[in-house]
Image: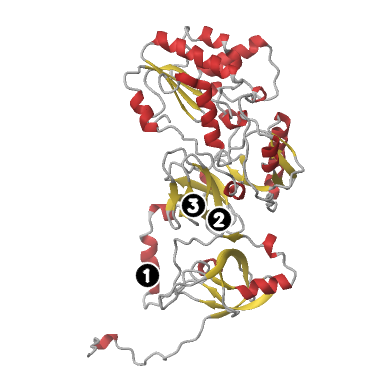
């Protein structure tokens, strides 16, 4: 076979048959190991010898190294196409010996006895390496590239990409890991996926943000590695801190004593603020006044039902104890205030449990903190509840002919279900302020949605799916006439009161004719 090249493309000298290895010295667990920068490898590989040596040096591998199961659905092959075999995957802190750059990344642990660490393309950019092709017109190339940047890039926005495949079962709570730029700062997440909420997040030392996600659908939710779910924005000058004057008039006031008359007045004010016209129908007030105890006008009025106690069935699993995650210095005071508030309300209590799950701090859009507990390990060993959640499309079909609608929202719904003593111990979470446990059902347990749906179906009884529709903590009353609507509303309020459940008045809308859950503006 003859190969023909254009004369102007022929270089005067041929390349050597063998090139140099791109080797670096890497510091891992206090020892120096040879590292190969491999731009042809999509993964990074850590010899098992490194872990064995670290253990011999006194490193507590079991507690200091996070281990992750290998995704068997993904095949890893070598250059010849043969499938490679590994022990596991771990998080390892890598530092170049002659530099200051250190990164924490996932690596496959090989079964070979060699000591060469392979640094693939998942780590190379984070160590500052990139593949650059020299051109004769570098200046023009850069200028052209800059001119063709998208508006998103020019605004310092970056794609929010799923770092690790996540599977969330129907009705379950899960966590999605998103990659962020290596800079440790606040980022605004603008999502394009309904299940993931927009908000302000802060990356951990690995450059990753973990987002809690609730799958309220009937289908499994799968977030694939590399999937783009939104954008990160870092131009903080576009954000504005919330001020007191920005708070809506319906915000519940804490620690304020009211007599019965003041309480009723406040309740009426909160309910009247929900309709578009700002008015509460005169026919509704007598019904609400008679059943006013079912509303939590103040947070301290939240109660727990006496119908069920939630159990966390872990079978023969030994207590799971995870390490405490550090709280940033700038947020410690706010974190303490949140814990003290939960303690004062009896939502949590101090614990001496052998179980311990870590907390995750997430910044909300208004700048305040949301405290979440990472129960992923506990959920893995919990017997799942198969109780079904309602099908939204079936609900919508049942609304044909209905003309009057009321939406009711339970106040911190899950917190109205108490935990058994055994479940309280298993709900324990570890913080920089000590060990605490929940006395009520936490939001992050995988069995929480099914437990609450079962309770609501029990409370609504035969009313369910006729003129009353319930999806976890959201209640829809739909009737053909106003007269019938008032009758059903009275029955529902009395049923909730009998179950010792509380509604949040700020989110209850009565007698609407143009809006109901199931529309794009509703559920």
In the structure shown, which secondary structural element does the residue marked by tag 3 occupy?
A: strand
Q: Which mark is residue 166?
A: 3
In the structure shown, which secondary structural element does the residue marked by tag 1 occupy?
A: helix
Question: Is 503 placed above or below 339 here?
Answer: above
Looking at this view, is 418 or 277 the one in front? 418
Check the picture and name the quadrant holding the C terminus: top left
Q: Which mark is residue 141?
A: 1
Mark closer to the observer (2, 1): 2
Real-space CA distance between mark 1 and mark 3, rounded to the nearest whole angstrom? 39 Å
Real-space CA distance between mark 2 and mark 1, rounded to the nearest whole angstrom? 32 Å
Report crowding for label 1: few under 14, some 14 to 19, many 20 or more residues within 10 A (C-alpha). few
Looking at this view, is 489 or 238 the one in front? 489
Residue 274 visible in the picture: no
Q: How is the image coloured?
A: secondary structure
- Give the residue displayed 39% in from the left and 52% down from the top: 151
Check the picture and name the quadrant holding the N terminus: bottom left
Q: Earlier in the sequence, mark 3 or mark 2?
A: 3
Residue 94, position as x, y percentages in the image: 61, 69
Residue linked to disc 2: 208
Mark closer to the observer (3, 2): 3
Quadrant in the picture for residue 252: top right
């Amino acid at each position: 076979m003859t190969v023909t090249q254009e004369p102007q493309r022929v270089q005067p000298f041929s390349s050597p048959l063998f090139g140099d290895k791109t080797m670096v010295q890497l510091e891992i667990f206090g020892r120096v190991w040879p590292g190969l920068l491999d731009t042809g490898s999509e993964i990074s590989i850590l010899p098992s010898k490194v872990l064995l040596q670290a253990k011999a040096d006194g490193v507590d591998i079991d507690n200091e190294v996070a281990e992750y199961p290998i995704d068997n659905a993904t095949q890893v092959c070598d250059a010849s196409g043969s499938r490679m075999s590994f022990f596991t995957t771990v998080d390892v802190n890598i530092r170049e010996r002659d530099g200051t750059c250190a990164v924490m990344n996932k690596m496959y642990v090989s079964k070979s006895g060699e000591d060469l660490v392979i640094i693939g393309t998942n780590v190379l950019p984070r160590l500052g390496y990139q593949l650059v092709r020299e051109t004769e017109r570098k200046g023009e190339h850069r200028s052209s590239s800059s001119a063709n940047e998208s508006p998103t890039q020019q605004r310092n926005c970056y794609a929010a990409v799923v770092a690790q495949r996540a599977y969330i079962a129907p009705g379950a709570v899960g966590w999605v890991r998103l990659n962020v730029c290596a800079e440790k700062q606040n980022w605004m997440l603008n999502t394009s996926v309904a299940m993931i909420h927009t908000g302000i997040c802060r990356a951990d030392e690995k450059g990753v943000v973990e987002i809690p996600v609730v799958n309220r659908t009937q289908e499994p939710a799968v977030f694939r590695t590399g999937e783009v779910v939104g954008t990160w924005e870092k131009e903080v000058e576009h954000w504005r801190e919330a001020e007191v004057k920005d708070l809506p008039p319906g915000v519940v006031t804490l620690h304020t004593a009211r007599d019965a008359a003041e309480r009723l007045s406040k309740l009426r004010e909160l309910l009247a603020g929900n309709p578009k016209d700002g008015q509460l129908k005169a026919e509704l007030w007598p019904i609400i006044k008679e059943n006013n105890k079912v509303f939590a006008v103040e947070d301290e009025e939240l109660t727990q039902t006496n119908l069920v106690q939630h159990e966390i069935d872990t079978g023969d699993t030994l207590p799971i104890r995870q390490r405490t995650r550090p709280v940033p210095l700038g947020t410690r005071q706010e974190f303490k205030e949140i814990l003290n508030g939960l303690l004062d309300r009896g939502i949590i209590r101090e614990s001496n449990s052998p179980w311990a799950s870590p907390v995750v701090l997430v910044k909300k859009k208004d700048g305040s903190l949301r405290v979440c507990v990472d129960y992923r390990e506990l959920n893995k060993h919990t017997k799942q509840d198969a109780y079904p959640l309602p099908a939204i499309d079936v609900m919508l079909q049942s609304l044909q002919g209905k003309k009057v609608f009321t939406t009711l929202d339970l106040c911190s719904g899950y917190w109205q279900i108490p935990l058994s003593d055994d479940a309280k111990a298993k709900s324990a979470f570890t913080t920089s302020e000590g060990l605490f446990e929940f006395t009520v059902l936490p939001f992050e347990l995988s069995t929480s949605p099914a437990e609450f749906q079962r309770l609501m179906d029990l409370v609504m009884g035969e009313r369910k799916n006729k003129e009353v529709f319930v999806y976890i903590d959201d209640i829809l009353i739909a009737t053909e006439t106003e007269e019938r609507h008032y009758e059903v509303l009275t029955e529902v309020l009395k049923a909730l009161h009998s179950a010792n459940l509380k509604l949040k008045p700020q989110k209850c809308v009565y007698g609407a004719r143009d809006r109901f859950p199931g529309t794009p503006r509703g559920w």
